Amino acid sequence: MKLIDFGVREDEKKYIQEWSKENDIEVKIVSDLLTPETVQLAKGYDGIVAYQQLPYDEKIFDTMNEFGIHVLSLRNVGVDNVPFDALKKNQIRLTNVPSYSPEAIAEYSVTGLMALLRNMKHMIRKIDTHDFRWAPDIGRELNELTVGVAGTGRIGRAAIKIYQGFGAKVVAYDKFHNPEIEKQGLYVDDLDTLLKESDVVTLHIPSLGKGHTLINETSIKEMKDDAIVVNTARGDLIDTKALYDAVASGKLYGAVLDVYENEVGIFNSDLSGSQLSDDLLDKVIKSPRFILTPHIAFYTTKAVKNMATISLNSMVQELQNGTSDNEINLDK
């Protein structure tokens, strides 16, 4: 068995190499993304592992079929950038890593929120200029707030435990109720109720599809004055301009964003010294009421190792058994 792994970062290499040695399976590591050009490198291999934020071109799967490669294993959760029709046409099975560390993302959402509540961004900037005055950066306490958790999958449930540990009141919304959360009586009937009751709204749901946002001009009107939005899920869940305007006008207190609707080509790129072409993003960065990070909530040693190894394990299961625990249903 021979595998090829595309889009591999430096921090992933050692985990892939360790897995390769432990399992006595050859894995070719490629730093380039999977494109119609680079897929040519996969000739002679049994399966392709990949991770990228850019869309996967349909031509890739035509070439995979020509090479007799019928499994693509993703090192990430999201599959919205993969054209299912092209996979089905070429009889290619798809796997993902449904959970690499829910705790990492949940912890990060709370970390960002605490930094915002205590005005850390503005305070650090002041201290950098030797301004050591307290005012006007008085903080708020999490234990006094109601946190609305939108989405009670693995990450949402991990977040609930952490918020409860801080003494916050938690309410939750999900189309599909988790028995554990149901037992605690945390669910509200609809999203509007969650927005109306919450001082903090934290998002832990998948993308709703292009053009479908959860936080927008209409939904913001339902939210409490001085409320906070936390998003470590998907950038396209939020109309960022509407969110920025609401914070700038004083309707909302601020936001913690680890994802951004137009992040592809910007996040995880070194743009030092260059002028951003995205004026809205530039405004968000400059505002003390926004905590912005470049999609790193997942980025821990545990999560990166799991992404590298679970994707490879799924590939082996697919090749040996014709299916795996993490295979995606392409008909959904």
Image (tube, grey):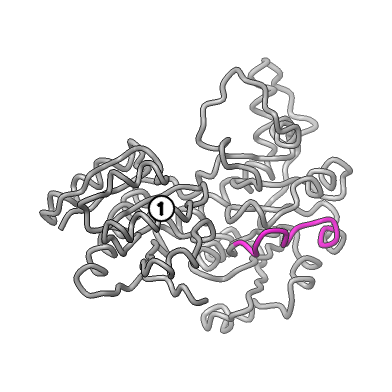
Q: Is residue 320 above or below residue 56?
A: below
Q: Judge left or right: residue 177 versus residue 326.
A: right
Q: Main secondary structure of the magenta part?
A: loop
Q: Secondary structure at mark 1?
A: helix
Q: Residue at x 59, y 46 (%)?
A: 258
Q: Magenta region: which residues? A: 207-220
Farthest front residue? 66
The residue at the point 72 percent across, 30 percent down is 286
Foreground residue among 49 and 133: 49
Whole-percent x, y for residue 36 in the image: 41, 46
In the picture of the structure, the residue carrying the numbered disc 1 is 60
- Residue 1 point in image, percent of width and height: 15, 58
* Image mark count: 1
Q: Residue at x 52, y 51 (%)?
A: 55
Percent x, y for residue 300?
40, 46
| In the rendered image, the vertical position of residue 236 relative to residue 186, given as above or below | above
Residue drawn at 30 percent across, 60 percent down: 310
Q: How many neighbours does mark 1 have within 10 angstroms: few (below 14), some (14-19), or many (20 or more)?
A: some
Q: Nearer the viewer, residue 114 or 329?
A: 329
Is 211 inside the magenta-drawn segment? yes
The foreground one among 63 and 296 is 63
Q: Is residue 31 left or right of residue 212?
A: left
Q: Is residue 16 magenta?
A: no
- Where 320 sits versus 277, above or below? below
Return the x and y of residue 149 as percentages of the image width and height.
64, 65
Q: On the picture, is 83 further left or further right than 128? A: left
The amino acid type of the residue labelled 1 equals Ile
Q: Is residue 116 left or right of residue 303?
A: right
